[in-house]
Each structure stands twice: as structure tokens, then as C-alpha cells.
Image (cartoon, helix red, strand yellow):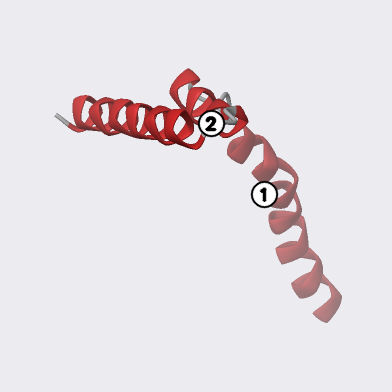
Amino acid sequence: MKSHVLVLPALLVAPALFFAPTVVGAQETPNLHRPALFDDLINCKAIENPEKRLACYDAKVESLDQAQKMRTS
């Protein structure tokens, strides 16, 4: 009789464990593509002239800031 008590819960739990990854996988996957603004910021580091590189960083950071403000408004 005790073996039936252990088998029944196992039979109930097994399908739930089998289908759990399907339910999790059904969720919307996030967009993993980097925004162009981020790539533009990274490209600034290739500029050799320190003043131009800093100007590039400043401009791209301002663009990112504006994009974030538009997203949250």
C-alpha cells in the first residue's frame, strides 16, 4: 500500500516537470539586438584624436539620454 502512496504523487509531478520548460519557453523572448545608438557610442573609442573622441562620446551620450527620456515619457 505504501508504494501506491509514493507512486501517485510522482505520476502527478512528472508531467508538470515535463511541460514546465514549454510554458517558460512560451514567454516572449527579449530583443537581444543592440540599439544603433549603443553601437555608435562604442565606435567613438576608435577615434584617435582625444578632443574628437570626447566630442563623439558627449554627442552619443546625449543621444542615449534623449532616447531614454522619450521612452519613459
Q: Determine whether, in the image, residue 25 is placed left or right of residue 51.
A: right
Give the structural element (helix, strand or loop) at label 2.
loop
Residue extending furthest top?
A: 36
Q: Quadrant of residue 67?
A: top left
For badge 1, the amino acid type reads: Ala
* Residue 28 located left or right of residue 6: left
Determine whether the residue tagged by mark 1 lies in a helix, strand or loop: helix
Q: Residue at x 57, y 28 (%)?
A: 47
Residue 20 visible in this rendered orientation of the protein: yes
- Tell which tag, 1 or 2, sits nearer the viewer: 2
Mark carried by residue 56: none
Residue 17 point in image, percent of width and height: 71, 51
Circle 2 residue: 49
Q: Earlier in the sequence, mark 1 or mark 2?
A: 1
Pick the front one: 24 or 56: 56
Is the C terminus in the top left, top right, bottom left or bottom right quadrant?
A: top left
Residue 71: which quarter of the image? top left
Question: Can see residue 1?
Answer: no
Residue of label 1 = 16
Disc 1 to disc 2, C-alpha distance: 60 Å
The x and y percentages for residue 23 are 60, 37
Give the class, few, some or many, for how many residues have Cα within 10 Å of label 1's Cα (few <14, many ≥20): few
Locate the N terminus and report the quarter of the image it occupies: bottom right
Q: Residue furthest right?
A: 3
Q: Nearer the viewer, residue 48 or 11?
A: 48
Residue 70 image-quadrant placement: top left
